[in-house]
Image (spheres, helix red, strand yellow):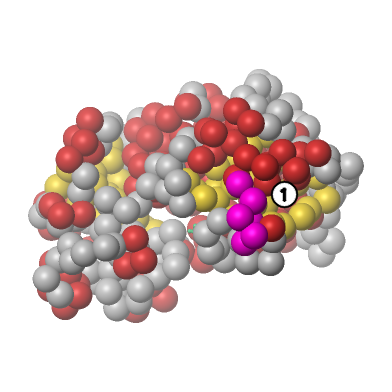
Amino acid sequence: MRFTKKDILGLEYLTPEEITLIIETARTQKDLLSRPIKKVPILRGKSVCTLFYENSTRTRTSFELAAKMLSADTSSVSVSGSSINKGESFKDTLLTLESMGIDLFIIRHEASGSSHYASQIVKSHVVNAGDGLHAHPTQGLLDMLTIYENKGKFEGLNVCVVGDISHSRVARSNVWGLAKMGAHVRVCGPSTLIPPDFDKLPCEVYTDLDKALEGADAVNVLRIQKERMDRGFFPTIGEYVKLYGITSERLKGCKDDVIVLHPGPINRGVEIDADVAYNHSVILDQVTNGVAVRMAILYLLLGGGNAEII
Ligand code: CP
């Protein structure tokens, strides 16, 4: 199967076959990460640009490493240090960079829909690296790869996404991607942190954490996004920790082999207990899988046809 989409804007726009192709390609390409020389010439001559209007450690670095491992040329533009700081518009920035020969943009922007907009402005490929509250498709895919590696399937799994659902593009990408592959997705958080339209998505909505965790195969814990909160969504952090903080004790209602994920960065001791995060989670596997998934995406958009390439 060939991957024929020009852009990756959200998992709601991908078919189960396309999601499977990305995950299978990532599983194959992950092998490169354990080689002494982590480089293959597969995207030689291609130019990739990370264009980030918001901060990032994992997404940006893993995309850059992934591109370099596949021998693409990389450039990196952020607000600080670029002409965006002089007032250059998003559109002009895109057109300017495309004129330099960029083949693929990886874009993070605070506005929901910004990657869609960019995909209409440029002929180059666009990968959404997080647009406002809408989507973070590559995070959704790396979460799915991590779940698949541990469970060997998606069909019939109970996956619980816990925390600040309102401000989370990761929650939406998890719901779309996992539901498409046959998992049952539950989202859980205080009612003030669950948007009213979430019951229209393919998931079940809970406010009672113990009920949401019952029989869960995987729990994805979301960060409390203080930087996106312009008012109090719960009385105190202490109360949030008591009701929604993930501890070993809280996980007792889950399946015995439950895995705990977190997209990072973590507010340690708030949404997730330090012992769970350090000793009983797959968080660092997610980070590694981020490189593999992003290699797969760059490869499929810029050059490849199937998983067996290296
Ligand atoms: N999970 C995630 O998107 O992390 P960064 O903000 O560090 O990229």
* The C terminus lies in quadrant: top right
Residue 77 position in % (x across, y down): 69, 57
Residue 102 position in % (x across, y down): 78, 41
The residue at the point 44 percent across, 64 percent down is 264
**Is residue 307 rendered to the left or right of residue 210?**
right
| Span shown in magenta | 84-89
What amino acid is at disc 1?
Answer: Cys
Relative to residue 276, is residue 20 depicted above or below? above
Residue at numbered disc 1: 49
Q: Is residue 43 visible?
A: no
The residue at the point 65 percent across, 22 percent down is 4
* The N terminus lies in quadrant: top right
Residue 109 position in % (x across, y down): 52, 50
Query: In front here: 134 or 175?
Result: 134
Query: In front here: 9 or 123?
Result: 123
Tell me which corner region of the image, top left, top right, bottom left or bottom right, holds residue 243: bottom left
The residue at the point 29 percent across, 78 percent down is 269
